[in-house]
Image (cartoon, grey):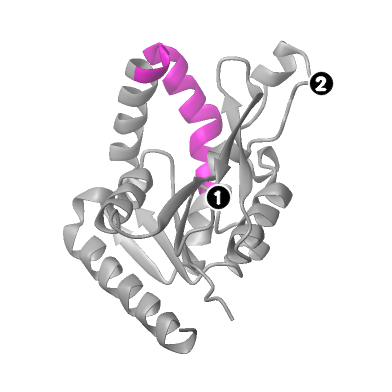
Amino acid sequence: MAKKPVVIGVAGGSGSGKTTVAKEIFRKFADQSILIIEQDAYYKDQSEKSMEERLDTNYDHPLAFDNDLLIDHIMNLRNSESIEKPVYDYTAHTRSDKIIPIEPKDVIILEGILILEDERLRELMDIKLFVDTDADLRIIRRLLRDINDRGRTIDSVIEQYTSVVRPMHNQFIEPTKRYADIIIPEGGQNRVAIDLMVTKIRTILETKEILNP
């Protein structure tokens, strides 16, 4: 029987550093079979909605994500089947016509703000991480990202943060911390935690190799 891949969930609030943690783990296994699946790629298709309706979408709410498709894709990868990962167009605020073919790998990193909110997703994970970063650092990082990378204004970022991002974080994201196996303070700056995670993942891979040679 073929060995199942190791599925690692990396959750945390917007600007927490979860993407950095996921990329650091990926880099440590760059010489092996590993891939990253971003929950952001699985925002629901909104092509049937008007642009005004799309702009009103709350992207920090669990209902914004197509978790059914994400779960199907993770299960396919665990069964050694390839998938077609969707691509979200942030300019059009809907799913693009493009897809990214993904082949199964030995390690799957699932990264996103709400991956621990859905019990079905949690059950597919071997290790669940929550990147815990102070709110002041998260808002600064979000400001820099949205202004520099997405052409947003300071006022629009702050308004969105106070009216949507912060309340959604407190209501839906922060409570999922209790489901984490490991909580990593300060995100990608925590080298010790990342090195410990890499060691743990290697141990799991070696164990699976022994059980399923």
What residue is at 33 percent from the left and 60 percent from the top?
A: 32
Residue 75 is tagged as none
Say whether residue 121 is left or right of residue 113: right
Q: Does residue 126 lie above or below 147 as drawn?
A: below
What residue is at 52 percent from the left and 60 percent from the top?
A: 176
Give the residue at mark 2. 48
Image location (x, y in percent) of residue 31? 28, 57
Q: Residue furthest bottom?
A: 211
Label 1: state its secondary structure: loop
Task: Name the image quarter holding residue 89.
Answer: top right
Image location (x, y in percent) of residue 123? 61, 70
Badge 1: few (under 14), some or many (20 or more) residues near its Cα, within 10 Å? many
Say whether residue 15 is left or right of residue 27: right
> Magenta includes 203?
no
Question: Principal SS element in the magenta part?
Answer: helix
Task: Name the image quarter holding residue 136.
Answer: top left
Give the mark nearest the N terminus, 2 or 1. Answer: 2
Please name the amino acid that badge 1 sits on. Answer: Leu
Task: Name the image quarter holding residue 190.
Answer: bottom left
Let me know if residue 60 appears in the view: no
Q: Which residues are magenta?
A: 149-170
Image location (x, y in percent) of residue 159? 48, 20
Select label 2 or label 1 by which is in front: 2
Residue 114 is tagged as 1
Image location (x, y in percent) of residue 23? 32, 47
